[in-house]
């Protein structure tokens, strides 16, 4: 068993779960969704094995290039979904959410992403690599779940406005609460991993905790957007549509911080 | 003054400022920062002068970005202060509710009748609440008991602690940018350097580069000794991610390099007729040495670490790494130049010696030795500890704001026509689902007493 095989098996399991989830969506058979959930869980375990093997094979944390960090992000997203689903039982969101996991896995396995493990450059040889990247990506994974539930909110909301009772789904009010709870978990994680651990590591490695490097700036921008989400919601009582829109913008900013900055803007964070 | 405070205590202002700072920060990542005027002219043409004048080209250090941050800081402070007095009052002087109507108006509430006496019922409610971690306060009247139970009251101040953390971080940033300084220098093995702006010296005892088997750099290590008043006080090996800290000054391993100008070359000269007759020479760049044949001399004239030929047919070095080291030598016989040409370390049979006459010699570049220097980045940052303390507040505040949210249960228990009646209501600003189930657990037990 090598890492690539395990990665592929977990990918297959996620796809199988997605198919079952969509079968559930059309057939309304709850058993299908329950099985899909179990399959995602199995996929997550196999995926964990892949990440552990990668760590052993390469001798360093499994997120030093785009392939590794995408694989870790999809692992985090699957984990975040397992946690949120376990708590809120939002099976109808499952099919859409698992699509994000699959998209990330597909991107990781695309030929654009170099897969060979390379030895760590001096700047990355630090235990802060583990702390900074894993906590940040975990936070972003919760933003991703919040993104899906926010989109589903908008759909549910417009359906309810048309008062179409023929298609019962999750109520929009519930989706609104779940989105908030995702961000309530994602925001502290992102702050800790992305900003605080990032600053500590930058200080240790570059001699300056803040350099206005594009990736730093964009993580601050992402942070501002979610701060806006929390203040408009908690202090000004914005809920529903406007809240959902800010959550969506926030996830797009997080995605740009993670992905876009590397390809579109240059800076100190040239590794990943 | 009052209107100023009202202006700054507005959440709408906070949101406007957040949006403005966000948009400005985005602009700063789109417009390349700290470039030269001609570069901007090439990028933006006419617009470049305006951009430079309005400091969009050094946006994060601009007066107006600083001004936005200042407004934001004032806004955070005033918002927090105006709200905190109210919160402190709530935390330390909880009101005990005596109006049944107001309890029944709460989103989470319940009314239960019981045959128990007023005392035993209020005791049992109290025990139930204490068992769930609530702190209970009560007041008794003739035929009634009023209870207010709370827990996680600290969570009330989560957002304030976050705001305090942010202010400390911003203050730390200000101290860093005003009182900090940063410079870099290079230092060779054995060299002793006066450290700028300090009264101590730094000696580099040893510098080494470690490589992976693949040839890429694994690590750079500089062993540095701090010398103060002529005494060595501290010796430490620094590497990337492991700086040396002394008296508030921090020294980072930031780069390394090779001083190719002060190098020593090892050149082997062989007789073509008798290859066992080897003349092993050590020669400094730019110097001449005599061969065994005392009439002959060679000079190492030019060295390139990575030999290449450019479009104009000129010899250049393609990098500063010793990928294809080559040296140009001149040969002299009785002070008269007789040959010259390039010899290559990696291609010993491929020399390009142009000689006036057949000299019967072959040359090999056997070794190159050049002093390595270490690039050290030095920084003094008096604001950094403020930033860490601020980050501590920030994280602690976020944690309690989201996961340690205050919960409050209010009860009125009264005797009414021989029965005891209890009115209970609950308040939780966040995470109402969990609170509701806790509230149900507490009140369910009472229901069974009937």
Image: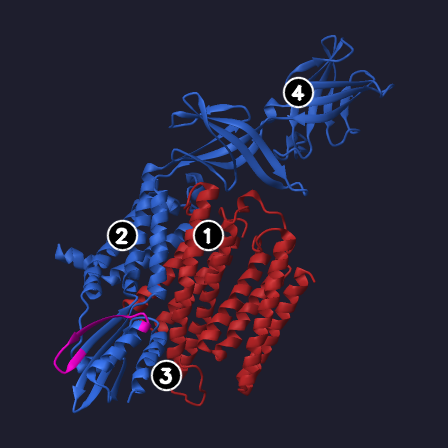
Tell me what hue chain A is rendered in: red
How many angstroms separate mark 3 from mark 4 (CA)? Answer: 85 Å
Do we see residue B54 in this rendering?
Answer: no
Magenta-colored span: B131-145
Query: Mark 2 = which residue?
Result: B73
How many angstroms separate mark 1 from mark 2 (CA)? Answer: 24 Å
Q: Is residue B380 above or below residue B414?
A: above
Q: Position of residue B407 (x, y in %)?
A: 29, 71
Q: Position of residue B68 (x, y in %)?
A: 29, 51
Identify which residue is drawn at 40% across, 62% down.
Answer: A187
Chain ID, mark 4:
B
Query: Mark 1 = which residue?
Result: A215
* Residue in front for this viewpoint, B319 or A15: A15
Question: In the rendered structure, does residue A260 fall within the stretch colored magenta?
Answer: no
* Residue in front for this viewpoint, B363 or B405: B405
How many angstroms separate mark 4 from mark 1 (CA)? Answer: 47 Å
Q: Position of residue A160 (x, y in %)?
A: 38, 84
* Residue in front for this viewpoint, B324 or B256: B256
Do we see residue A128 in this rendering?
Answer: yes
Residue B49 image-quadrant placement: top left
Which numbered disc, 1 or 2, marks the residue closer to the eye? Answer: 2
Q: Which mark is residue B418?
A: none
Query: Mark 4 = which residue?
Result: B301
Query: Mark 3 = which residue?
Result: A161
Identify which residue is drawn at 46% across, 43% down.
Answer: A204
Q: Quadrant of the C terminus of chain B?
A: bottom left
Contact flag, marks 3 and 4 (Cβ < 8 Å): no
């Amino acid at each position: 068993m090598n890492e690539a095989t395990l990665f592929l098996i977990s990918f297959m399991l996620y796809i199988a779960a997605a198919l079952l989830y969509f079968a559930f969506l059309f057939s309304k058979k709850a058993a299908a969704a329950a099985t899909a959930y179990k399959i995602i869980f199995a996929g997550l375990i196999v995926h964990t094995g892949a990440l552990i093997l990668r760590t052993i094979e390469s001798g360093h944390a499994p997120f030093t290039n785009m392939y590794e960090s995408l694989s870790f992000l999809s692992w985090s997203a699957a984990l975040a979904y397992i946690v949120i689903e376990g708590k809120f039982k939002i099976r109808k969101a499952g099919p859409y959410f698992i699509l994000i996991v699959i998209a990330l896995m597909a991107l990781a396995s695309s030929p654009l992403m170099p897969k060979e493990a390379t030895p760590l450059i001096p700047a990355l040889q630090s235990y802060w690599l583990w702390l900074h990247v894993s906590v940040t990506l975990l936070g972003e994974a919760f933003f991703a779940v919040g993104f899906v539930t926010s989109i589903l909110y908008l759909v549910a909301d417009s359906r309810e406005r048309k008062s179409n009772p023929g298609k019962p789904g999750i109520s929009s009010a519930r989706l609104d609460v779940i989105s908030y709870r995702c961000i309530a978990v994602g925001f502290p994680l992102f702050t800790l991993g992305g900003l605080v651990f990032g600053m500590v590591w930058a200080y240790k490695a570059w001699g300056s905790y803040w350099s206005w490097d594009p990736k730093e700036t964009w993580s601050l921008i992402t942070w501002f957007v979610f701060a806006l989400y929390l203040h408009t919601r908690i202090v000004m009582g914005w809920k529903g549509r406007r809240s959902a829109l800010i959550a969506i913008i926030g996830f797009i900013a997080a995605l740009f911080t993670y992905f876009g900055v590397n390809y579109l803007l240059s800076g100190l964070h040239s590794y990943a | 003054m009052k209107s100023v405070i009202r202006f700054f205590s507005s959440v709408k202002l906070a949101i406007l400022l957040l949006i403005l700072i966000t948009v400005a920060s985005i602009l700063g990542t789109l417009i390349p920062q700290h470039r030269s005027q001609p570069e901007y002219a090439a990028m933006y043409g006419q617009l470049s002068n305006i951009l430079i004048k309005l400091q969009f080209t050094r946006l994060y250090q601009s007066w107006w970005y600083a001004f936005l941050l200042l407004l934001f800081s004032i806004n955070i402070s005033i918002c927090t202060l105006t709200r905190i007095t109210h919160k402190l009052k709530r935390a330390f002087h909880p009101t005990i509710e005596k109006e049944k109507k107001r309890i029944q108006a709460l989103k989470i509430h319940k009314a239960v009748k019981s045959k128990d006496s007023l005392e035993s019922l209020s005791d049992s409610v109290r025990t139930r609440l204490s068992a769930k971690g609530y702190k209970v306060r009560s007041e008794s009247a003739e035929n009634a008991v009023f209870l207010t139970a709370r827990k996680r009251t600290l969570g009330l101040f989560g957002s304030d602690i976050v705001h305090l953390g942010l202010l400390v971080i911003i203050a730390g940033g200000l101290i860093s940018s005003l009182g900090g300084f940063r410079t870099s220098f290079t230092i060779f093995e054995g060299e002793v350097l006066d450290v700028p702006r300090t009264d101590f010296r730094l000696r580099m005892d040893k510098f080494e580069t470690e490589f992976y088997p693949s040839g890429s750099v694994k690590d750079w290590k500089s062993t540095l000794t701090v010398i103060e008043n002529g005494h060595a006080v501290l010796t430490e090996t620094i590497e990337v991610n492991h700086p040396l800290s002394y008296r508030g000054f921090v020294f980072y391993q930031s780069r390394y390099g090779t001083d190719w100008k002060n190098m020593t070359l090892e050149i082997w000269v062989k007789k073509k007729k008798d290859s066992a007759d080897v003349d092993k020479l050590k020669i400094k760049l730019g110097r001449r040495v005599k061969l065994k044949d005392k009439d002959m001399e060679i000079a190492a004239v030019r060295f390139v670490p990575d030999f290449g030929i450019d479009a104009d047919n000129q010899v250049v070095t393609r990098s500063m790494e010793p990928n294809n080291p080559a040296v140009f030598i001149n040969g002299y016989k009785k002070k008269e130049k007789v040959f010259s040409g390039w010899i290559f370390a990696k291609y010993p049979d491929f020399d390009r010696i142009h000689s006036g006459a057949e000299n019967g010699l072959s040359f090999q570049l056997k070794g190159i030795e050049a002093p390595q220097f270490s690039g050290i980045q030095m920084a003094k940052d008096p604001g950094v500890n403020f930033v860490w303390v601020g980050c501590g507040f920030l994280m602690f505040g976020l944690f309690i704001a989201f996961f340690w949210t205050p919960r409050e249960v209010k009860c009125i228990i009264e005797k009414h026509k021989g029965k005891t009646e209890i009115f209970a209501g609950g308040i939780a600003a966040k995470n109402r689902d969990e609170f509701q189930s806790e509230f149900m657990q507490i009140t369910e037990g009472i229901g069974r007493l009937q």
